[in-house]
Amino acid sequence: QVQLVESGGGLVQAGGSLRLSCAASGHSFSRYIMGWFRQAPGKEREFVAVISSSGDTTEYADSVKGRFTISRDDAKNMVYLQMNSLKSEDTAVYYCNARLMPYDYWGQGTQVTVSS
């Protein structure tokens, strides 16, 4: 069992930056593929970024590529999402995800609001 708690969301002006954090509790954190997803009002949850268990490989949605960076610190059981050059369309609830098949865990989410 893995529990995930996101933090770092808030209100920011367009062009600004935020860093989201995800604290994970449980065993074998370093074995999990970690990701960030988001859900805007009236829309389905969508993929944002993912990082491999080793931390060597990352992937990003085209909409955030070049602006967002995902990273992990296995010593602290933490995953981060650095978000730069934020746009109004980045407004959403951001969710942390931990995946180690067949297990799939989600946090409660943190709200990010970008004002234009």
Image (spheres, rainbow, N blue to C red):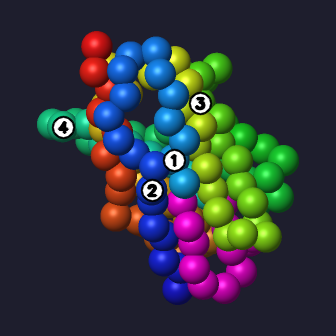
> At x 45% / y 59%, what residue is drawn?
6
Please determine whether, in this image, residue 63 is positioned above or below residue 69. Answer: above
**Residue that carries the numbered disc 4 in the rendered image:** 41
The tag earlier along the polypeptide, 3 or 1, is 1
Q: Amino acid at mark 4?
A: Pro
**Spatial CA span between label 1 and label 2:** 6 Å
The tag earlier along the polypeptide, 4 or 3, is 4
Q: Amino acid at mark 3?
A: Phe
Judged by depth in the image, the label closer to the viewer, 4 or 1, is 1
Is label 1 in contact with label 2 (beta carbons under 8 Å)?
Answer: yes
The tag earlier along the polypeptide, 4 or 2, is 2
> Does the magenta run of residues contain 13?
no
> At x 62% / y 71%, what residue is drawn?
100
Instruction: Tell me where the magenta segment starts and ends, as one range.
Output: 22-33
96 and 83: which is toward the camera:
83
Drawn side of residue 40 relative to residue 72, left or right: left
Name the secondary structure under disc 1: strand
Please determine whether, in this image, residue 31 is positioned above or below residue 72. Answer: below
Which x, y percent locates residue 86?
Answer: 45, 22
10 and 106: which is toward the camera:
10
Is label 4 in contact with label 1 (beta carbons under 8 Å)?
Answer: no
Which x, y percent locates residue 84?
Answer: 55, 25
Please determine whether, in this image, residue 79 is positioned above or below residue 86. Answer: below
**Spatial CA span between label 2 and label 3:** 16 Å
**Residue that carries the numbered disc 2 in the rendered image:** 7
Crowd around label 2: few <14 · some 14–19 · many ≥20 (10 Å) = some
* Disc sitting over residue 68 in the figure: 3
**Spatial CA span between label 4 and label 2:** 19 Å
Q: Answer yes or no: is residue 50 visible.
A: no
Q: Answer yes or no: is residue 2 visible.
A: yes
Q: Amino acid at mark 1?
A: Leu
**Spatial CA span between label 4 and label 1:** 19 Å
